[in-house]
């Protein structure tokens, strides 16, 4: 369906730098109260994505896996709440662990292993599904059921591969040639 197509983008990244660059570009669309849900196996690149998103929000502190704390908070253009549910069994435990915090309304919450929340996830959110492991390229699918979150999809850079500096230098020539 046309509507569904409009609310989904797929991007391939070849290394963690490209994944972080993609996330940083998306962060320009961030507004207070947003929820970004990251899905993907261990080592897929969820934390790399969170790091890039934080950089895009102007966060200068190093973003690391929250580890044994459920949520880490960082200061940027908007506060970033980085949640990692890896160690939690299910939503009941996650919610009991204090996942929902009124301060999150003022910032962006980015959740690794968001599937742990299952039905407790609100429909208003951006899903980031990362496929691939090791040194293989990652297929990153961005999707939402909420029209308001479509603003993120508009920030997807046109092929992320062109983030290569040589390609950036080549770009104006192509634009001048009418392409
Ligand atoms: P997760 O949080 O999903 O468990 P991490 O972000 O901690 O995963 O780790 C991803 C690992 O994969 C890192 O070691 C990173 O260097 C590596 N990697 C290789 N290619 C990519 C890519 N295209 N995007 C993200 N990470 C990548
Ligand atoms: Mg992680």
Image (cartoon, rainbow, N blue to C red):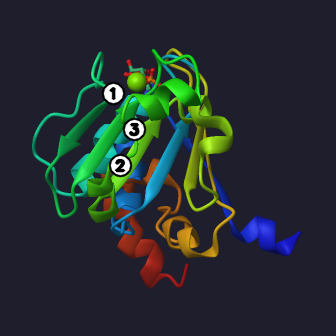
Q: Residues within 10 Å of mark 2 (few under 14, many from 20)?
A: many
Disc 1, disc 3: CB below 8 Å?
Answer: yes
Cα gap from disc 1 to disc 2, whole angstroms: 25 Å
Q: Residue furthest front?
A: 96
Q: In the image, which is nearer the foreground, mark 3 or mark 2?
A: 3
Instruction: Return the mark for residue 21.
Output: 2
Q: Which residue is mark 1?
A: 70
Q: Give above or below for 177 relative to 23.
A: below
For image coordinates 23% across by 49% down, the residue present is: 55
Q: Tell me if residue 146 can be seen.
A: yes
Spatial CA distance of label 3 from label 2 is 27 Å
Q: Residue furthest right?
A: 1
- Assign a secondary structure to mark 3: loop
Q: Earlier in the sequence, mark 1 or mark 2?
A: 2
Q: Residues within 10 Å of mark 1 (few under 14, many from 20)?
A: many
In the rendered image, the quadrant that contains the N terminus is bottom right
Q: Nearer the viewer, residue 79 or 128?
A: 79
Q: Which residue is mark 3?
A: 99
Residue 76 point in image, percent of width and height? 16, 56
Q: Position of residue 124 (x, y in %)?
A: 58, 62
Residues at marks 1 and 3, CA–CA distance in whole angstroms: 7 Å
Q: Quadrant of residue 4?
A: bottom right
Task: Indicate the quadrant containing the C terminus: top left, top right, bottom left or bottom right.
Answer: bottom right
- Number of the front mark, 1 or 2: 1
């Amino acid at each position: 369906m046309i509507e569904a197509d409009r609310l989904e983008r797929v991007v391939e990244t070849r290394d963690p730098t490209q994944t972080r660059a993609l996330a940083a570009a998306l962060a320009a669309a961030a507004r207070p109260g947003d929820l970004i849900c990251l899905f993907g196996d261990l080592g897929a690149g969820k934390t790399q994505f969170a790091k890039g998103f934080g950089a895009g929000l102007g966060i200068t502190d190093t973003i690391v896996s929250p580890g044994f704390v459920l949520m880490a908070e960082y200061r940027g253009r908007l506060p970033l709440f980085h949640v990692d549910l890896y160690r939690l069994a299910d939503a009941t435990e996650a919610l009991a662990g204090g996942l929902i915090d009124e301060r999150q309304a003022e910032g962006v919450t980015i959740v690794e292993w968001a599937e742990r929340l299952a039905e407790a996830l609100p429909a208003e959110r951006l899903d980031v599904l990362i496929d691939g492991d090791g040194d293989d390229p990652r297929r990153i699918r961005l999707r939402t059921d909420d029209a308001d979150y479509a603003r993120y999809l508009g920030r997807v850079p046109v092929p992320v591969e062109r983030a290569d500096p040589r390609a950036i230098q080549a770009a104006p020539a192509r634009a001048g040639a009418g392409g």
